[in-house]
């Protein structure tokens, strides 16, 4: 199953659980981060820089891309936990747009 398909299902499931807030005072949210520079990229073919840039050696060529840092994903999770005004929502986290509630 493609990741975007799973993400959409998770968002709809989370929204369906939003009614638990009014019934049981339970808040349910989800965080949908973009690509994050995690330890999986500490491989001989990958290098994660301090700024979250991931460099990949592919067939003799070097290509680089900017990904979310683990700290940015944690910030979004903490936002979902601390902000009691949001429930039944998905928080999307991307490099160019930051944290967005959807």
Image (spheres, rainbow, N blue to C red):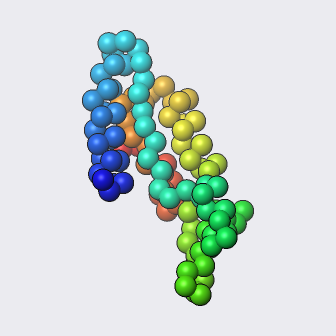
| Image position, residue 44 (x, y; %) | 67, 70
Name the residue rendered at 51%, 54% in the picture: 98
Query: Is 27 placed above or below 33 here?
Result: above
Please tell me whether residue 9 is drawn above or below residue 29 in the rendered image.
Answer: below
Residue found at x 56% / y 63%: 67
- Whether residue 100 can be seen here: no
From this viewpoint, which residue is outermost toward the right? 50
Q: How many marks?
A: 0
Left or right placement of residue 12 versus residue 93 in this view: left
Q: Quadrant of the C terminus?
A: top left
- Seen at 72% across and 62% down, the residue is 50
Tell me which residue sits at (44%, 47%) in the image.
32
**Residue 99 location (% of width, % of height):** 49, 48
Question: Is residue 61 something one can see in this rendering?
Answer: yes
Q: Name the residue nearer the viewer: 99 or 30.
A: 30
Where does residue 71 sit, x and y in percent of width and height?
A: 64, 48
Q: Is residue 4 left or right of residue 80?
A: left
Up-down: is 43 above or below 21? below
Q: Nearer the viewer, residue 21 or 48?
A: 48
Return the residue nearer the eye: 68 or 83. Answer: 68
Left/right placement of residue 79 relative to residue 21 reads right
Within the image, what quadrant is residue 90 found in? top left
Q: Nearer the viewer, residue 34 or 85?
A: 34
Residue furthest to the bottom in view is 60
């Amino acid at each position: 199953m493609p990741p975007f398909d799973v993400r959409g299902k998770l968002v709809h499931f989370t929204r369906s659980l939003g009614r638990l807030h009014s019934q049981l005072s339970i808040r349910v949210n989800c965080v949908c981060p973009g690509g994050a520079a995690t330890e999986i990229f500490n491989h001989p073919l990958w290098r994660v820089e301090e700024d979250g840039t991931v460099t990949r050696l592919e067939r003799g060529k070097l290509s680089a891309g900017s990904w979310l840092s683990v700290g940015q994903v944690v910030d979004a999770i903490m936002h979902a936990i601390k902000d009691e005004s949001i429930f039944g929502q998905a928080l999307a986290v991307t490099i160019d747009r930051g944290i967005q509630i959807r």
